[in-house]
Amino acid sequence: VVPKGLVEEAELKRKREMMIEDPKGRKWRVGMYLSQSYQVRFSGGWAKFMRENQVAKGDTLHFHFISRTQTIRVQIAN
């Protein structure tokens, strides 16, 4: 589930995909959808992002929306 604050700031309910940037500066196109409970969730491309960045259960992800590039920067804390 995408954090509510990020959904509002980036107006994600209106979008079907978004560019995200990993800590190394690599960009990833990920799909998004609105669930039945009206939560925005990442889909296509998200699993690859998680795998390539070796995100593990218990890691914390911090999201920062960059408005000028319409990109979400993701920081990963182990």
Image (tube, helix red, strand yellow):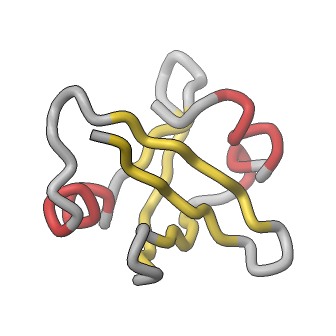
* Residue drawn at (45%, 30%) of the image: 1
Q: Position of residue 60 (x, y in %)?
A: 37, 34
Q: Give the total number of marks visible in the rendering.
A: 0
Residue in the picture at 74% in, 52% down: 14
Judge by depth and name the residue closer to the eye, 51 or 33.
51
On screen, 73 above or below 64? below
Extreme front residue here? 78
Instruction: Please provide percent x and percent y for residue 5.
Output: 74, 32
Horizontal side of 35 relative to 73 (left or right) equals left
Q: Residue 66: x, y in percent?
A: 75, 67
Quick check: 53 above or below 24?
Answer: above
Quadrant (top left/top right/bottom left/bottom right) for the C terminus: top left
| Residue at 66% from the left image edge and 53% from the top image edge | 64
Residue occupying image coordinates x 57% and y 60%:
16
- Judging depth in this view, the residue of 12 and 6 nearest the camera is 6
**Residue 69 shown left or right of residue 29 in the figure:** right
**Residue 13, quarter of the rendered image:** top right
Vertical relation: 49 (above or below) 56: below
Q: Nearer the viewer, residue 19 or 55?
A: 55
Vertical position of residue 78 compared to residue 64: above or below: above
Residue projecting furthest to the top: 37
In the figure, is residue 71 to the left or right of 25?
right
Instruction: Please indicate whether residue 60 sits to the left or right of residue 7 in the image.
Output: left
